[in-house]
């Protein structure tokens, strides 16, 4: 597994998101295909994630927000 250092202002790719959240990469791909994960951004042909969006998604889930986006 690739180790990725994420700067707070940097956009994360799928492997960095998986590492940040602590889930398998396949979970991130499943979230994308089911539209249940954190908000994502298309940069050309690439999918990226803002750390603020990921943190907001995690906060929503930890406060009993809407179901969806379950971990592996």
Image (cartoon, rainbow, N blue to C red):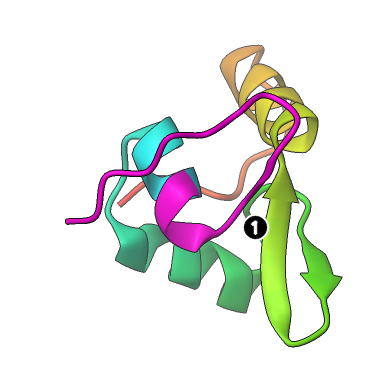
Is 56 placed above or below 68 here? above
Q: Which span is picked out in magenta?
A: 1-16
Q: How many numbered marks are there?
A: 1
- Label 1's element? loop
Going by the image, does 39 lie left or right of 3?
right
In the image, residue 59 sits, relative to residue 29, either above or below, namely above
Residue 54 placement (x, y as % from top left): 67, 35
| Residue 4 x %, y % | 37, 43
Please identify the residue farthest to the bottom as the structure is shown. Answer: 45
Q: Which image quarter is the N terminus in?
A: bottom left
In front of the other: 48 or 26: 48
Quarter of the image where one finds residue 8: top right
Indicate whether residue 18 is drawn in magenta.
no
Residue at the spot x=75%, y=30% of the render? 9
- The residue at the far top in this view is 63
Tell me what residue is drawn at x 56 percent, y 50 percent: 69
* Residue 12 belongs to the span the image colors magenta: yes
Q: Position of residue 24 (x, y in %)?
A: 27, 54
Q: Which residue is mark 1?
A: 36
Relative vertical location of residue 56 with respect to residue 11 in this rendering, above or below: above
């Amino acid at each position: 597994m690739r180790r990725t250092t994420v700067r707070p202002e940097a956009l994360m790719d799928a492997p960095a998101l998986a590492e940040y959240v602590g889930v398998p990469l396949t979970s991130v791909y499943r979230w994308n295909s089911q539209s249940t994960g954190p908000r994502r951004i298309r940069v050309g042909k690439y999918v990226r994630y803002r750390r603020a969006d990921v943190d907001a998604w995690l906060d929503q889930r930890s406060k009993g927000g809407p179901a969806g986006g379950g971990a592996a």
